[in-house]
Amino acid sequence: MKKTVLILLALVVFTSVSAQQSLNDYKYIVIPNKFDFLKEADQYRLNSLTKFLFEKYNFETLMEDEVLPSDYGKNNCLGLKADLLKESTMFKTKLVVQLKNCKNQVVYTSSEGESRDKNYKIAYNQALRKAFKSIESANYSYNPENVILLTSSTQDVAEEQEEIKILKEEIENLKNEKEVAVKESKVKDEVVAKVKETVSVSQSPNTLKRVNVLYAQKTQNGFQLVDSTPKVVYIIKETGMSNVYLVEGKNAILYKLDANWILEYYENTKLQTKIVNIKF
C-alpha cells in the first residue's frame, strides 16, 4: 500500500514538473471571444474571467480580436490557444481548461473543476476557478531561452518565403532578358529589312559597282582590307552587331547581306552602294 502511494505521488510530481516546463516555454495565452459551447461572445462573462485568471497566475494574455504584439505576429508559436471543455451532467457543471500550440497539439489540460449550482453564471464561475487550481500549482514563469525550440516551423516558413522571393526575382530576370532579346531581334529585323530595301533600290548600273578582290587582315579592333598590290584600301572597325563594320575615315558602313559584303556611303548627298569582294 505504501509503495502504491509513493508511485502515485511520483507520477503527480512528474506530471506537474512536465507541465511547468512545457508552459514556461510559451509567452502568451490567446483567448477566444466565444467558447464553442456558448451561444454568445463572453456569455456569463466566462471569457473575461478566463483572461483574468490567467493574468492572476502571471500569464500574458491576448484576446483573439485585439492588435497582436510584433513578436507574436512574426512567430505565433510563442502563444498557446486557450479553450474550455464542458463536461456537465444533470446535477453538475464541469469545466476543463485546454491549451494548444501553433500546431494544434494539446500542450496542457487542467484538472476538472465542477459546481452543483443550478444558476449557470454562478456554476461556470465556480467550476472555472476550481479548474485553475492546477494551473496555479504549475507556478508559471516564462523562460525565453527555450523559445528557439518553438520557432522551427516559423524558421521553415521564413526559409520558404525567402526561396519564393528568390524564385520570383529569377523569373523576373528571365522575363526581362526575354524582353531585351525580343527587342534586339526586332531591331535587327528592321535593319536587315531596311538594308535589303536600300540595296534593291540602289542596284542600278550607276550606283552598284563591283570592285576587285580585297584581303582582310586582322587588326586590334577590326580588319584592314588590302588589294593585291598590297595597298590598304579600307580600315574597318567592329560594331556591336555581327557582320557590321564602320569604315575608318569615311562616312561609310560595311555589312554582309546574304552572301555579299555591301559598302554604303554618301557622295554629294546621294547614297552610293558597292558590293565588295572580300576574302577573310
Image: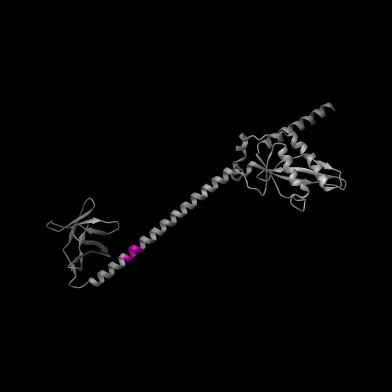
Question: Residue 275's quadrant in the figure?
Answer: bottom left
Image spot of residue 254 (x, y percent): 23, 61
Q: Is residue 191 left or right of residue 214?
A: right
Question: Residue 194's quadrant in the figure?
Answer: bottom left
| Quadrant position of the C terminus in the picture | bottom left
Image spot of residue 179 (x, y percent): 41, 59
Magenta residues, as a range? 186-190
Q: Is residue 110 left or right of residue 197?
A: right
Q: Is residue 46 left or right of residue 254?
A: right
In this rendering, is residue 162 above or below 248? above
Q: Which residue is found at the position 26% from the left and 62% from the top? A: 256
Q: Is residue 203 magenta?
A: no
- Majority SS type along the magenta span: helix
Image spot of residue 145 (x, y percent): 61, 34
Q: Return the residue nearer the eye: 236 or 71.
A: 71
Quick one: which residue is furthest to the top in this view?
A: 2
Q: Is residue 189 magenta?
A: yes
Quick one: which residue is furthest to the left in this view?
A: 229
Image spot of residue 159 (x, y percent): 54, 45
Q: Return the residue nearer the eye: 27 or 279.
A: 27
Q: Which residue is found at the position 31% from the left and 68% from the top? A: 193
